[in-house]
Amino acid sequence: MEITLIKGDGIGPEIADSVLEIIDSAGLSIDWDIQTAGMNVVEQEGLPLPERVLDSVKKNKTALKTPVTTPIGKGFRSVNVQLRKELDLYANLRPCYNIPSVKTKFENVDIVVVRENTEDLYAGLERKVNEETAESIKIITKQASERIAEFAFDYAVKNNRKEVCVVTKANICKLSDGLFLNCARDISEKYPNIKLREILVDNCCMQLVQNPNQFDVLLLPNLYGDIVSDLCAGLVGGLGIAQGANIGREIAVFEPVHGTAPDIAGQDKANPSALLLSAVEMLNYIGENQTAKRIKDALFRALDDGIKTTDLGGNYTCSKFTKEVIARL
Ligand code: NAI
């Protein structure tokens, strides 16, 4: 079986090596088509996301991806945004749940963030009007809003969830967020067993940090989804354990929520768990459920035994952590 591995920047290569070693030690033979993307590639090939990367993902249909740098306020367009758009990976799925051995302020948090992944302010329609004014255009379409709502409700049905909460700022962005909300309302009528809840994004953030247990599946447009999913990651132990997936009709790219962590890159300090949990979801997606379970159990046992990287309050390096997970497979 061939799967694309996109190696990005910063801690990307370190956590990719860790996860490949763990999957290999679990006895699963995957023919990894390793593709590089990001800053290093710009220097050599002139652009951060060469066609070869897209071709590989289109051919293999499944990919595991590590983070890629996006220059802030200048430079090339986000590789992530481009990848999601080019491959029409319209649903960004980010499950956030407590891992028992990772102590946080709250217990039993079990939220699934479903984020629309192709439009909103990420459409990249920005321009400088004059020296003192810039504008960004927020695109929300009926087609994209309906299909992401359908994805959220389908997910709720398949995973025994009770409620989908649609998060917008439709009191201010009456037309754009209003359309997103109306689409969710329309789609919800096809799912009588799943409750639809509506909340404004500011209130949602406040409720999340006060009482996250009230939420089940969250459905959000792209920008709020990006921000709220980091907030949710923080509720359950931080970016080191927050997994994610970008899913389209035929193609899926699994990647952690976190970025390239330049502050710890190259120091063997990164927590590979978020990428590993994303890989576990990828294995479930391709039907390798038993190996997925063995890897997840080994990871949770290691955490239970106090094997933790510094982001979780421990002192294990990425490579030592990897060895400990492998020992528990
Ligand atoms: P970040 O997620 O890279 O880092 C935020 C904080 O979390 C840092 O203190 C970092 O050390 C820590 N952290 C993140 N992942 C960790 C891990 N696995 N183990 C231990 N600690 C971890 O966010 P930041 O600094 O805002 O972004 C850095 C770069 O990453 C930017 O260029 C940004 O555009 C890019 N980025 C890429 C993403 C992707 O490729 N999917 C997603 C988010 C950001």
Image (tube, helix red, strand yellow):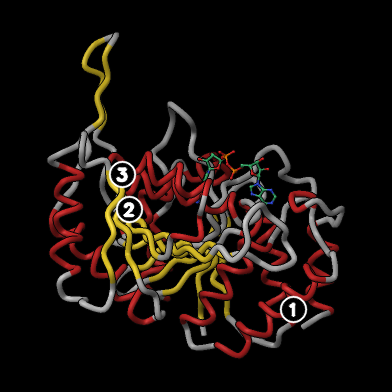
Q: Residues within 10 Å of mark 1 (few under 14, many from 20)?
A: some
Determine if the C-beta at disc 2 is less than 8 A from ligand 1. no
**Depth order, front residue of 96/10:** 96
Identify the residue position indicated by label 3 in the image. Answer: 200
Q: Provide residue 53's location: percent of width, then percent of height.
A: 44, 60
Precedes in sequence: disc 1 or disc 3: 3
Q: Quadrant of residue 324?
A: bottom right
Compared with 77, 1 (above or below) is: below
> For the point 42% across and 52% down, which residue is it?
50
The residues tagged by marks 1 and 3 sit, at their Cα atoms, a distance apart of 39 Å
Instruction: State which mark lies toward you, 1 or 2.
Output: 2
Residue at mark 1? 298
How many other residues sit within 10 Å of disc 3, few (<14), some (14-19) or many (≥20)?
some
Task: Report x, y in % for residue 214.
Answer: 45, 60
State yes or no: discs 1 and 3 in contact (Cβ < 8 Å).
Answer: no
Q: Which residue is mark 2?
A: 220
202 or 285, which lies in front?
202
* Secondary-structure class at tag 2: strand
Task: Please indicate whether residue 188 sits to the left or right of residue 52 in the image.
Answer: left
Q: Is residue 87 above or below residue 292?
A: above
Viewer-side label of 2, 3: 3
Q: Disc 3 residue type?
A: Leu
